[in-house]
Amino acid sequence: MRISLSYSLFTIIIFLISACDIFEGSGPLVNKANEEPYLLLDKRDNKFVPLLNKSDELVVITVNRNSIYNKNYDGKYVGLEFDLASEFGKELGKRVRFIVVPDMDKALTILEKNQGHLATGISATTKNKLQIIFGPGYQRVQPQVAYNTNQLKPKNIQEIVGKNIEILRGTVHGERLSQARLETPELKWTETDISTEDLLLKLADGKVDYVVTDSIHISVAKNFYSNLGVAMSLGKENTKAWALSLREEPELQKKIEKFFKRIEEDGTLNRLIDRYYGHIQRLGQENVNKFLEKTNTFLPTIRNYFYQAEEITKIDWRLIAALSYQESHWDRKATSFTNVRGIMMLTKATAERMKVTDRLNARQSILAGARYLLILKNTLPSRIVEPDRTWIALAAYNQGYGHIEDARILAQRMNLSPDLWVDLKKSLPLLSHRRHFENLKYGYARGGEAVYLTESVRAYYDILKKYESPYNQMPHLQKH
């Protein structure tokens, strides 16, 4: 399948990103909070850093995982831990420097050597609490045993004894397995230095029997490999937190506690978690199977149309393709009971507005649908930033701009933000409730469908970003 080859290309790209010279810092450091953070690979000895109140920068140690940081379509680094630390740096008025290390043990070692001010995404375990100080917990995850669904699902821990079990070195999962071995002494496993993403790929390819990792990683991977499942949970949920060295001044811990209290109260934390993980459990195994099959068989026949749509709108072709798939499953002749038609499921009114002469013509439909999505994005208030701007525009594509304005008004009445997708997900479904839509300008709407479409498009878009190259990295293609 193309998946293995595509994943290899994806891995090479991530490696190149990791090896990029800009991680060493391009130019002198400028101690301004509005400067972009930068990354430093741990390929040389790091120096002792002064206490934060005597430092011009916040030095953050983070583990090299794609879920923590990666480049988005605009070439900027994003990721939950990256965004949280960058937000904290802005609050402190300091430039953020990231030191990227291969595993949690290395992060804690560097922290104990006073080569960084804090480490992000650390499991707040009993073992770790003996070495460092933890800030507030901000994300709960469940350690789980993942299995290949082409094999029988084990019923209990005894049924995985004697099998090839792998975990990432320096994680809480070794501690959980050690606890399980107290009751099952024959239990053995192997710790490895490859990434969680690579471990789960090995599991999908049948090269390992089981992988123990966090529930979030498994949920993400299930959208890429449809033959992954959860066999069982190991112990209680675990909390992610920032870690500080014992020598760090108490003032930093107080600032971290104040920061997390603020972002919990104003919704920033919830918004960031939703940005990266709010949609990961949207697709089922059958959905992923069908989508991967069609990306191999049918997408190549219409891919050029999506490239052309990106050239016109500057919207990532993979997002347009994901929207098209959710709307019609890439069926050129799709028709709904309301007479919405074509591969982008255009209404007659929208087709006329976009000068479409034949809604069943794939090229016309794709170009028109992309242009219409751009119009919706541009119509939204300028204060709405990405990625919320795109997610809200997708919802408007489904239900119409007027109903999105109603949902934004309703969000305000609910003391929610009208500019954040995480809040509109709460108000949109209420547009089908009489006590709400009777007091809104555009009336009844199936707002829940807009949420379903947007979250599904986000999931399909993630899959395409993993397996399909950006258009701007492709050679120039002849237009049809």
Image (tube, rainbow, N blue to C red):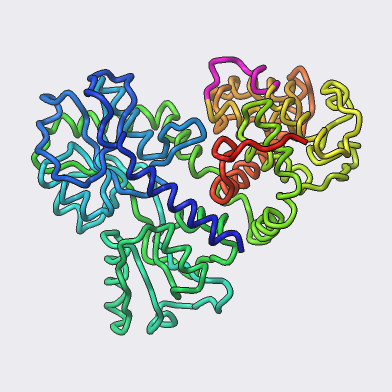
Extreme residue in the top direction:
382
- Give percent across and percent down for residue 456: 65, 45
Horizontally, residue 238 falls left or right of residue 322, namely left
Q: Is residue 255 visible?
A: yes
Q: Is residue 433 visible?
A: no
User: Magenta stretch containing residue 398, yes or no?
Assistant: no
Please report the residue visible at 28 percent of the width from the left and 71 percent of the height from the top: 179
- Give percent across and percent down for residue 168: 33, 62
Horizontally, residue 58 falls left or right of residue 357, namely left
**Where 132 sits versus 411, above or below?**
below
Horizontally, residue 449 falls left or right of residue 224, namely right
Q: Is residue 434 or residue 387 the one in the foreground?
A: 387
> Hey, which quadrant is residue 412 in on the image?
top right
Q: Is residue 271 or residue 9 the one in the foreground?
A: 9
Where is the N terminus found, in terms of image quarters? Answer: bottom right
Horizontally, residue 144 falls left or right of residue 435, namely left
The magenta segment is 375-385
> Hey, which quadrant is residue 134 in on the image?
top left
